[in-house]
Image: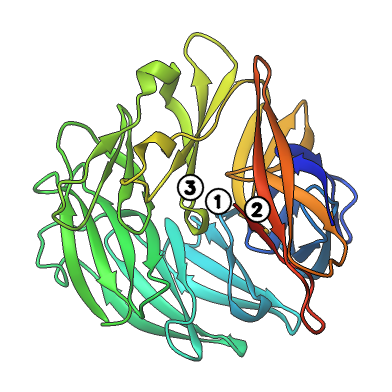
Amino acid sequence: MLTIDKAFYGAMVAIDFEGITDLTGNFYFDGNAAVVENNRKLSFQTCTQDGPGKNVSCKALGSYSLKSGDVTGEKILSLTNGVVLAWVTNFSNNRTTLLAASENGLHAFVHPGIVLDIAKYLKATASLDYIAVAEDNAVVVLAVNINDSTEWQVITTLTATNFDETDFCPVEIRSQKLTAHPWGWFIILSNCNNGKNYSQEIFTWAVTKDTPTPALPLSSFDSPRNICAFMREILVVTHERIYGVSIADDLNYWSVPLSTFNIDIDRSQIFCLESQNLAVFIGYVKGSNQRGTVFIRGNSGYRQDRRYPHILEGLSSDRIHAHDFLGSILISAEEFGEIGFVQTYIDPVVAFTTKSVQADTVVDIEVTVQNASASAKFTTHVTVKKATGEEVPTLAAE
């Protein structure tokens, strides 16, 4: 027997952070990890959820008191074995502190210089996670022991010499990993506005080969500021446009029709949720204080009709961020100092309950899809399969 409880999409969820009662400040999420910054402290937490739309419960791993001049980095990383990584820069001291928290405690790894961005590559080896940090003229690849987050080492330092270039000015770094193959890369956006050659380029470094790999010069039509790295394509954000290209010579090029969306790109942000092949573009609607949000599918060259699955308009929050959290898209929104969390998925999630059947049973399910202006209905066949042994019955849509 099959019973559809509800279809879940875009609902407010409550998040209970252990030890945090004042939901103000900055909130960062990645995987099952969260870091809350308020009252000049960082609280590191790991989170669980019973199902879509259910309340989220987070357990505190430790805290770190920010010192004078400390500025928290704009992202956190969820590493292997429950390690949560955040980073804090201090311009007056010209240093960056990488903070790794786990159930075994919190470790501070001091890195000389100012880090501009970080990216992770999980299980680069059987015992090491790699962390790439971008500086003004270099990218340093660090390794952290997955069984002991107090053990750090420098793997390599990448400069212009490694790529046989005159200029190397990293501004953002992402990573790609093929799930079916032991191959992966760090993807580096270099934008040398004041360099000798005014170069702007995407560089790659193969984690599995420990060597620089193909690079991609970018158009000089405008100045790139962000990238998202999907498996077959890279999303490039400039102050003029958003477009997709590929490192491979496959003639892949596509662009986002911002004129249709009527969003001011200069007052916008892009959030990369690469584990879901998704980018979330949030910006002000031109001529207003309202925001619009465009969900952009990556790795979709073969399905351009699914490139923009969702577009939200009329958002009025003062600050909106999108996070890759617990397998979902978590939107944190602040208005008048109050923070709220909205959980959604790139496709709606259907909640259902089942009871045992004596034989495989086909059930006709009538589905209604509705938005603010229209609705549609269709019927689909779902097979409830007989359980074998101690298994839970499985479903197969037809």
Tell me if 246 is positioned left or right of 129 in this view: left
Rendering coords of residue 193 (x, y %): 21, 42
Which residue lies at the image location 13% right of the left edge and 55% below the top edge?
249
Mark 2 or mark 3: whose residue is earlier in sequence? 2
Q: Can residue 115 be seen in this view?
A: no
State which quadrant residue 232 falls in. Answer: bottom left
Mark 3 or mark 1: whose residue is earlier in sequence? 1
State which quadrant residue 5 falls in. Answer: top right
Kind of residue indicated by mark 1:
Glu
Badge 3: how crowded within 10 Å, few (<14), some, or many (20+)? Answer: many
Query: 185 or 307, which lies in front?
Result: 307
Query: Label 2, label 3: how many angstroms apart (C-alpha)?
Result: 18 Å
Query: 206 or 306, which lies in front?
Result: 306
Rendering coords of residue 220 (x, y %): 14, 37
Tell me if 320 is positioned left or right of 268 in this view: right
Mark 2 or mark 1: whose residue is earlier in sequence? 2
**Any mark on residue 285, and which?**
none
Kind of residue indicated by mark 3:
Leu
Per the image, label 3 sits on a secondary structure element best described as strand
Q: Mark 2 points at which residue?
A: 28
Which residue lies at the image location 54% right of the left edge and 32% below the top edge?
310
Q: Name the residue under label 1.
A: 74
**Any mark on residue 278, and which?**
3
| Numbered disc in front, either 3 or 1 | 3
Which residue lies at the image location 53% right of the left edge and 59% below the top edge?
89
189 shown above or below 79? above
Pointers 2 and 3 in contact (C-beta within 8 Å): no
Query: Label 2, label 1: how many angstroms apart (C-alpha)?
Result: 8 Å
Per the image, label 2 sits on a secondary structure element best described as strand
